[in-house]
Image (tube, grey):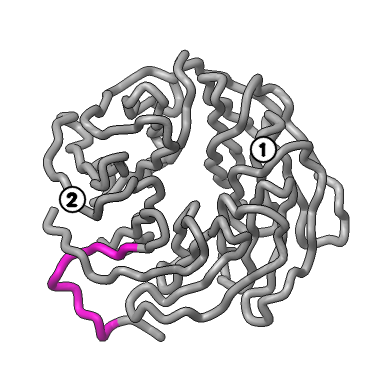
Amino acid sequence: MDLVAKRSINCEQGAVRAVRYNVDGSYCLSCGSDKKIKLWNPRSGLLLKTYGGHADEVMDAAGSCESSYIVSASLDKSVIYWDVSTGLPVRRLRGHAGGVTCIRFNEESSIAVSGSKDNTVACWDIRTRKLDAVQTMREAKDCITALVVSEHKIISSSLDGSIRQYDIRAGELVCDTIGVPITYLVQTRDGQCLLAACSDGTIRLIDNDSGELLAEYKGHRVDDYTIECGIIAADTKIISGSAEGAAIVWDLLEGKEVRRLRIGSEVVHSLAPHPTGSDILFARKRHLEVWGKPEEDEEDVIE
């Protein structure tokens, strides 16, 4: 787990709320408190495009499977579907009664799934001109904090302490209650486990089928922040941001801390592991930080 700082980018968009890679990791997105989304080449640090159209802070964004479109979620209660190349909004989707906190595409990028402070998860058919949500899930009792969307499942986490798995094919809902507010959720690449970051400063590894608690990871500082976590190194390591300006790496199986990366002095709250390589994006205050293995060749990237 030899990771070094490769690049620091001042995003110049107020506080960076989230950092996300596109589907193949050649580009990345930063979401700002200045109501804008920025598209970057993370290897060169080059700003490629700025997307402006929201009326409040942008909390999350996702790129489509062919990297032609972006969806973004904002505290202005709307979801915007963007054309990457023109930088213009294709569609603005309003239907949430509260700020939108998280957004994901399905695998074909035909449906956008959003979670909101209004306690609902909404599905939008973005390939049609239909402006209303095609489905809205209202089971949560508190703010939706994160989403995992697979071929036939939508999994949501909420501050009500529960993980809800909606099986779209079977029309079934399975609810696993952790009992502590869940602030972030990711799935292992093999789809067998979920990793839930909780407000009590514990990250919990949960079996996707049984809901059984498999492991716990501690040692990072949460304070009152929403701190994201991720799974790296082919599902063998867990990584999380921390309120003291660091990122902590644990061994997934043993649960012990194996590395502590000193990112800076500010809270490291958002992160995104590269979909195929070893690079990791971190957000701290106004900056996007790129870390990775030092020996990875900079020349093998398609510009």
Q: Residue at x 40, y 42 (%)?
A: 228
For disc 2, the marked residue is 261
Q: Is residue 213 magenta?
A: no
The picture places residue 60, in percent across and down from the top left corner, at 56, 52
First in sequence, mark 1 or 2: give its number.
1
The C terminus - image quarter: bottom left
- Is the residue 204 above or below the residue 154 in the image? above
Residue nearest the viewer, comparing 201 with 175 = 201
For disc 1, the marked residue is 116
**Where does the magenta region start and end?**
289-300
Q: Amino acid at mark 2?
A: Leu
- Is the residue 243 above or below the residue 9 in the image? above
Q: How many marks?
A: 2
Residue nearest the viewer, comparing 244 with 31 = 244
Give me the C-alpha separation between circle 1 and circle 2. 32 Å
- Whether residue 24 sits left or right of residue 120 in the image: it is left
The picture places residue 74, in percent across and down from the top left corner, at 66, 51
Within the image, what quadrant is residue 119 found in? top right
Q: Amino acid at mark 1?
A: Ser
Task: Report crowding for label 2: few under 14, some 14 to 19, many 20 or more residues within 10 A (C-alpha).
Answer: some
Looking at the rendered structure, the secondary structure element under dot 2 is strand
